[in-house]
Image (cartoon, helix red, strand yellow):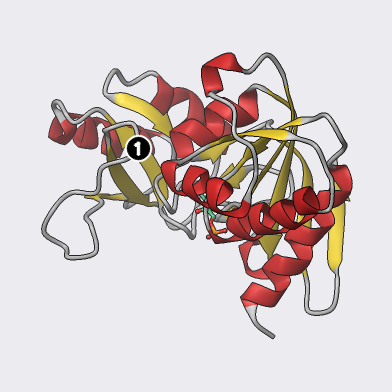
Amino acid sequence: MSANRQKTFAAAAALAYVEDGMTLGLGSGSTAEIFVRLLGERIKDGLRIQAVATSNQTAELAQEVGVPLIDVDHVNHISVTVDGADEVDGHFQLIKGGGGCLLREKIIAHASDLMIVVIDESKLVSRLGRFALPVEVDRFGFSITAKQIYDVLRACGIAKPDVQLRRKGDGLEPFVTDGGHYILDCACGAIPDAAMVDYRLKALPGVVEHGLFIGLARVVIVGEDTEARVLEL
Ligand SMILES: O=C[C@H](O)[C@H](O)[C@H](O)COP(=O)(O)O
């Protein structure tokens, strides 16, 4: 069965958490995009909400499908954020940032009363790390930061980390985030202690943010072939 169908079940189930008058955080990526499109349909049917987007791409889509956006610096309170993930483990720890939107996603998730993660089944893992961990870094001295990240990952028990600068599709130019930073993708194989990696990466001056989301998601909705499974902490 297609991952797209599973993503649609998950995104549709997240609508049950949306109520009139809420300010929502809109995540990024293909699953969050399905949610935004479904939200647009509800708004056409009379739902009244406003939203803040976690990427330029999501903002463009929201405008296209009629979801009213509010400037992030005019938001007082965000009730619910709905976002995708690249990996989710049994403790609701996430890897995010496959699309390079992790910084804004984390800012909005952290400011929300509730973060709901919508995924297809393939994203559930017993241990994080099969997906390369994206780390957003300042462009200045990124090679120095890459070396420091390598050392941190080694110190966290990852035997052979591989830290690579993310490039655009053409492979020539570095990928640049909405915030103007580079992404270093860190292949780890498995991450034995995500909390330690979180803490130690954040201590590096060149690291702007990383894709480990720990203690943020409280609801995970897993799209399956015929329905969605809602997991709550
Ligand atoms: O930067 C991108 C985001 O963290 C996405 O939410 C994540 O990569 C999952 O995307 P998708 O739903 O397309 O698999």
Lateral position of residue 5 relative to residue 106, left or right: right
Residue at image point 44% right, 53% down: 98
Q: Position of residue 39 (x, y in %)?
A: 73, 51
Label 1 secondary element: loop
Nearest the viewer among 115 and 137 is 115
Is residue 49 visible in the rendered image? The answer is yes
Nearest the viewer among 184 and 1 is 1
Residue at image point 42% right, 23% down: 202
Quarter where residue 31 is shown: bottom right
Residue at image point 32% right, 40% down: 177
Q: Position of residue 46 (x, y in %)?
A: 84, 46
Q: Is residue 218 above or below residue 208?
A: below
Disc 1 crowd, CA 10 A, few/some/many (<14, 14-19, 20+): some
* Farthest bottom residue in view: 1
Lateral position of residue 162 relative to residue 76, left or right: left
Lateral position of residue 34 relative to residue 104, left or right: right
Q: Position of residue 166 (x, y in %)?
A: 25, 51
* Ligand 1 has an atom within 8 Å of the beta carbon of the residue at disc 1: no
Q: Is residue 28 above or below residue 79?
A: below
The residue at which mark 1 appears reads as: 178
Residue at image point 76% right, 52% down: 44
Q: Quadrant of the N terminus?
A: bottom right
Q: Amino acid at mark 1?
A: Asp
Number of marks in the rendered image: 1
Q: Position of residue 35 (x, y in %)?
A: 68, 55
Quarter where residue 120 is shown: bottom right
Lateral position of residue 143 relative to residue 63, left or right: left
Is residue 127 visible in the rendered image? The answer is no
Q: Quadrant of the C terminus?
A: top right
